[in-house]
Image (spheres, coloured by chain):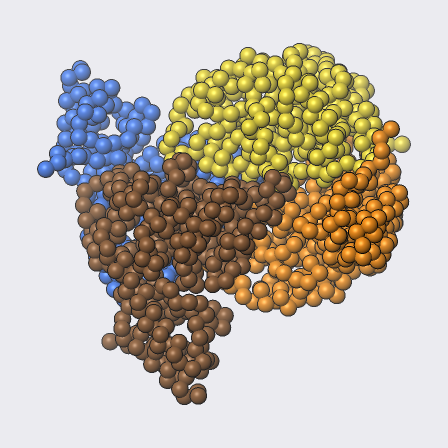
Chain colours: A blue, B brown, C orange, D yellow
Amino acid sequence: MNAPIYDFRSDNVGGAAPEILEAIIAASAGTAAPYGDDDFTRGMNERFSAVFERPVQVFPLSSGTGSNAVALAALANPYGSIYCHETAHINVYECGAPEFFTGAKLVGLPGRDFKLQVDALDEALALAGRGNPTRVQPFALNLTQPTDFGTLYAPEEIASLCAVARRHGLRVHMDGARFANAIAALGCSPADLTWRCGVDVLSLGATKNGAINAEAVVVFDAGLAREIPYRMKRGGQVLSKARFVSAQLARYLADDRWLERARLANAHAAALARELEALPGVSLVAPAEINMLFLRLPEAAVAALDRGPFRYYKLGPDVRFVCRHDQEQDGMDALVQCIRGAVSRSH
Amino acid sequence: MNAPIYDFRSDNVGGAAPEILEAIIAASAGTAAPYGDDDFTRGMNERFSAVFERPVQVFPLSSGTGSNAVALAALANPYGSIYCHETAHINVYECGAPEFFTGAKLVGLPGRDFKLQVDALDEALALAGRGNPTRVQPFALNLTQPTDFGTLYAPEEIASLCAVARRHGLRVHMDGARFANAIAALGCSPADLTWRCGVDVLSLGATKNGAINAEAVVVFDAGLAREIPYRMKRGGQVLSKARFVSAQLARYLADDRWLERARLANAHAAALARELEALPGVSLVAPAEINMLFLRLPEAAVAALDRGPFRYYKLGPDVRFVCRHDQEQDGMDALVQCIRGAVSRSH
Amino acid sequence: MNAPIYDFRSDNVGGAAPEILEAIIAASAGTAAPYGDDDFTRGMNERFSAVFERPVQVFPLSSGTGSNAVALAALANPYGSIYCHETAHINVYECGAPEFFTGAKLVGLPGRDFKLQVDALDEALALAGRGNPTRVQPFALNLTQPTDFGTLYAPEEIASLCAVARRHGLRVHMDGARFANAIAALGCSPADLTWRCGVDVLSLGATKNGAINAEAVVVFDAGLAREIPYRMKRGGQVLSKARFVSAQLARYLADDRWLERARLANAHAAALARELEALPGVSLVAPAEINMLFLRLPEAAVAALDRGPFRYYKLGPDVRFVCRHDQEQDGMDALVQCIRGAVSRSH
Amino acid sequence: MNAPIYDFRSDNVGGAAPEILEAIIAASAGTAAPYGDDDFTRGMNERFSAVFERPVQVFPLSSGTGSNAVALAALANPYGSIYCHETAHINVYECGAPEFFTGAKLVGLPGRDFKLQVDALDEALALAGRGNPTRVQPFALNLTQPTDFGTLYAPEEIASLCAVARRHGLRVHMDGARFANAIAALGCSPADLTWRCGVDVLSLGATKNGAINAEAVVVFDAGLAREIPYRMKRGGQVLSKARFVSAQLARYLADDRWLERARLANAHAAALARELEALPGVSLVAPAEINMLFLRLPEAAVAALDRGPFRYYKLGPDVRFVCRHDQEQDGMDALVQCIRGAVSRSH
C-alpha cells in the first residue's frame, strides 16, 4: 500500500461530491439534444434564476479560463481595455486567454490585500484617455472574488467599485472561480454579491468545490447574452454533450451542500491559520478569509515540507496551502506537526 | 409515462458507455494534480502510444471544436491557409473557431463524395502563390475522416493526399470526430489510418461513441507538440480536473469495446439503408459507409416523420439519420415503418 | 541611355499627376496637427461631401488593403462572415488582411464576368444559418467595383445586390480601388454608384490614378464611423502627417482631372483591345470595360513578349495588360506589333 | 494675413525637408514595380546597409505604429509577452496595435527616467514562469530610444539590457521614432546604438525629422526577415507605390542632413530648457536630452500660454514642448517671454 500523500496544492486536486457523480449517471439515461439545447440545461437555467432571485441566462462550459474569456468577450471590444487588479487570475494565470477572446488590453492596478481600490480605479479611469484614438478605450472591470490570494471584497466594496466603473462607462465581470467560498465566508446571498451590487456577468466555478469541470457564465443583462453562443462556439467552449455539465450545475445549486462544502473548506483553512500563525517565524502573507493560506515560512520549515509527504505550491518566497471540502484531518495534523517540528528545531 | 421519442439527430444525443461512467467514478478517489500533470493523463498517453504503435503525445480536452482548433494552431501561421473539403466540419460548423485559433484562412475545395481529390488538391496548391506576399501561404491540409456526410477515405487515398500536401510543404491534420466508426468500417489499424499515411496530428473524438465530452489531440510529430500546452491554455482548452477526461480516454482505448460500439452503430445504419433504399422515391445522397444516412425522401415521408415521435435533422431538401451504439431497435423499426407507410400511401 | 521598358503590369507602376505633386509641396508649408486633426483633412472631408452630394465622413490612409480592412472592420464582427465574389481582391490578394482586421470569414461565391449575381447571393444567404451558433453569421457584402478582372457592375446591379444584402441584414462595402475608372466608364455620378444604391462604406483609391499612396475610407452612415479611428490606430493605419494624404485627396477631387485621367486610361485599353482582339488566336478573357485587358494569347505571342521590352503579369494561362493615364503611345504600338508579329509568323 | 501660431505640439507638425520633396518628385518619373519590388527600394536597402555598416533588410512603410507592430510580430508569438517600460509608446499610445499584430501581451515595468533598468528587468524575467503553460512566455524586449519623455539610453545601458534579454531567451526591438535625435545627441554611430549592442530589429522613423510618412523596419537578423512581407501585407502595411517612401528614406540617409536637422532641433530644446529652467517655479520633469521638454509650470504660466498663440500638449499637470528642425526662433522667443512674463507677474 502506498504511503499517504497530503495534497495542499489546490482545491481542484480533489474529487467529486457524491451527488454530483449521481447527477452525471442520471443524465446518461435517454437522449438529449447536443450543444445545450436540452432540458437539463433549461432546468439548470431555472435553478440559477431561483438561486439568484431573478431571471438569468446561464451558459455551461468546462473551463474556468474559457468562462472568464467568454464573459469578458461579451463586454470588451478589440480596441478596448479591461481593468483588473495586477494579481488578478485573468492577468497572470490564463496565458493571455482574455486578450485572445476579447482583443482587448488588460490594465492591472496595484491595491492593498490584492484588491482594487475605489480611488485608484477612479483615478486610473480618469487618465485613460476616453475618446482619444491613440489610447485603448476602457470597456470592462474585472473583480476576482475571492481574489487569487484568498481575500474577499465586502459587498459594499463591490458596489462602490461597480459604481465607479458605471460612471466611466464600464461593464463589470466577476471571476467567481471560488464563488461558493466567498458566499460561505461573507454569509450573504448570491444576488447580494453580484447583480444587486452592479455586476453584469459572473463566471461561477463549481469545479473547485466538488464538481467535474463544470463552470457557468451567468449573465444578468439579457442584452449581453445575445452574442455569447457565437463567441462560445468560435472559442471551442460549446460542449457536445452539454447536458453532463448542466446536470452537475443544476444539482450543485439544488440544496445547501455546495455551501456546506465551502464552509467546511474555509473552516479547515482557518484552523490551519490559527495553528501555524502562532509559530515563531511564521506569518500570513494575506488574511485567511477563505480556504487558502499564503504564508511566509522559515527556511527550515520549507525544507522539512519538501522532505515530507506533502504537495503544495511555492510563490517566490511564500507558500500556498489550499484546503478542500474533502480535506483529510490527518493531512492537516501532519502539516502542522511538520512545520512546528522544523521551527522548534531551528529556534 | 412519456411516449418514446426516437432520436436520430446525432450520435452525441446518446448516453455514456457503462465502463466510461465507472472510469469517472474511479478517478474521483484521491487527489491528482490539475491541468493534465497527473498519472491518469500519463497513463492515457501510454495507452494511446500502445494503440497507435508508436510514442505519441496526447492532450485531453472536452470540445471537438477545441480539439480541431488547437491541432490546426500547431500547424498554421496567421498569414497561412488550411486546405479542406468545402463541406468539412471545420469549414462549416465551427463558427470560425479554426480561423480564430490559427489566424489562417480556410480554403474549401469541391470533390466527389464529400472528399478531397488528389488532382484537384495538387492543382489548387500549384496555383496558391507560394512565396507571393499578397497571397496567404498554404500551411496545412485538413482531412475529415469520416466526412461530415459519412463517407470514408481509404488509407491509400489518405496516403496520396498526404503525399501531395508534403510535396507542397503542408502538414496534415485529421479530424476524427468519428474515428472509431472509420476504423470499424475500414478494418484497418489506427496507425494505418494516420501516421503511416502521413498524418501529423489527429483530433480523436470519443464523445460520439460513448464518452462524455472526451476528446484528444494526438500528435505524431514531437516537434509539433511543444507549443500546444500554451495554445490550449490561451484557448481555454486546458481542463482544471483533466484527469476526468484522461481517465475516460484511457478506458475508451483499453479494450475493443470502442470498436464494438462503432461496429454496432455502423451496422444499424447499414440495415436502415438497405430497408429504406428499397422504397420507391427514396435515394441515398451519400454512400452509407458508417453510422450516418443522408437521404432524399418523398415529401409525404418527410411530412409523416414530422408528425411522428422522431427527432432528426434536415439539410436543405435532404434528411440525416444517425445511429448510435445504444440505438433502440424499436426506433429503427418505427422509422422504417413510418417512411414505408407514407411512401406506399402516396404511390 | 537605357532602352525603353514598356510597363503594363499595373496602373500603380506609374507616377503622380503634376497637380498632386504640387498639393504635396503646398502642404509642406507651415505646421498642422498630426493624425488627421488638421485643416487639410477637414477640407478634404468637405470636398468629398460636395462630390458625393451629401455629408460623408472620410478617413485618409495610405494603403488600399488597409482601407478595405478598416472599412470591413466597421461592418463585421469576429464571428461573422463577409460575402464577396470568389475572385474579389479582398479574398485573393490581401494575404488575409480583411480576416485579420475583422476576425470574420470571407465567403467567396462564383458568378459570371467575375461579378456576384443576385439570385446566387440570395440563395447563399438563405442557407447561411442565421441564428445557428455553429455557423458564422453574415454581416457584410463586399462589391469590388470595378472587379479585379476589369468588369463593371451597372448601378442597377449594385442596387439589386444591396437590396438582397439589406433584406438578409448585411451592410455593404464597395472596394473602389479603381473607382475613377468605373465612374469614367459608366458616366454616372459618385453618389449614383454608391449610397444611392445602398452602399454603406466605400474604399476609394486614388493611388492607381495619379496619387501617391492616397486612399480614403468614405463612410455614408455616420453611426459606422464612430469606431473607425480606433480600428485605424490599432491597425497602424493612422498617418502621423495625415495632411499629406488629405491634401492629395482634396486636390484629386477638386476638378475633373481625375476623371479625365481615368477616361484616357480606359480609352487606351479599349484601343488595345480592338487591335488585339482582331488577331487570330487572341481572345478576351473578360470584357474590356475599364483600363485592364485580360487575354488568352497564342504561345508564340507570349514567348515574343517575354523577349521584348515589356513588363506584364501572367495569371495561369492568361495575360494582363493595364493602361495608365500616363501611358506612352509607343508602348502600346510596340505591344501590338510584337503580338501581331508573333501571331502572323505562327500562322 | 493670419497672426503667427507657434506650434510646439510635436515634431510631426512640421513640413518636409527640401531634398525629401525633391526625392519624391524625382521618383515620380518613369515606372517602377509596386509593393517594394523596385530599384528605389533596393537602393534604399543598400544605403541602410552602408550606414549601418552591415547587410540589413529594410522594409518601407508609412506608419510608425505599423512599423513597431510589424517588427514586434517578427519576434513574438500569440502566447508570448513583450517587455517594455510602462511609459513606452507601444504600451500607451498605439491603441493596442502591438497586441493586435502579435497576439502577445505587453508587460510594462517601472524605471527611473522613463527607462528600463537592468536589475528590474532581470528579476521580472526570472519570475515570468518560463515553461509554465498558465503564463504568457517572454519573447521580446522593447526599448524606446529616445523614450517618449525624451530621455536616452547610453549604448552601454542598451548592451546590458540586451544581454539580460538574450540570457532569458528574448529578442530585442528598438522603437526609434526619433532615432536621429538619439544619434545626434549621443554622437555614436547607428551601428553602435543598435546591432552592436544586441538589437535585432529597429523601427527607424524619418517622419518626425523632415520626411513625409516614411518609416523603416530595419532587420539585423536575416532569419527574422523571412515572414515580414506576409505580416506587412496582412497588416495593410505594404505600400502600392512603395518607391515614394523608399526614395525618401534613401535620400534621408544619403548625407548628414538628417543628423544636422536633429542636432538643430536638439539644440533648440536645450536652449529653451536653459532659459525656462532658470525661471522661478519652473522645473524639468525629465532631463532634456533631445528635442523635447517636459516641464512643470506655475499655473499662471499655463494660463498665459493658453491665451497666447501657442500650441502644445498637456500631460496631466505637466506640459510638453517639442522643437522641430524647422523651428522658428520667433516662436521660441515668444514662448520664453510668455512664461517669463507670467512667472514674474505672479511673484
Q: In this view, does B304 lie above or below C230?
A: below
Is C236 displayed left or right of B84 in the figure?
right
Q: In which quarter of the image is the N terminus of chain A?
A: top left
Q: Nearer the viewer, residue A268 or A126?
A: A268
Is D261 displayed left or right of B169 in the figure?
right
> Image quarter for residue C288?
bottom right
Q: Nearer the viewer, residue A146 or C254?
A: C254
Is D343 displayed left or right of C20 in the figure?
left
Please indicate, yes or no, whether residue A264 appears anywhere in the rendered image. no
Residue drawn at point x = 26 percent, y = 44 percent? B50
Q: Is residue B321 above or below residue D291?
A: below
Is A53 displayed left or right of C229 in the figure?
left
Residue drawn at point x = 38 percent, y = 48 percent? B194
Residue D317 position, x and y percent, is 61, 26
Please indicate, yes or no, whether residue D22 appears anywhere in the rendered image. yes
Q: Which residue lies furthest to the left in this view?
A: A1
Residue B273 position, x and y percent, is 37, 72
Q: Nearer the viewer, residue C206 or A13?
A: C206
Residue D249 position, x and y percent, is 73, 26
> Image quarter for residue B242?
top left
Residue drawn at point x = 56 percent, y = 48 percent? B125
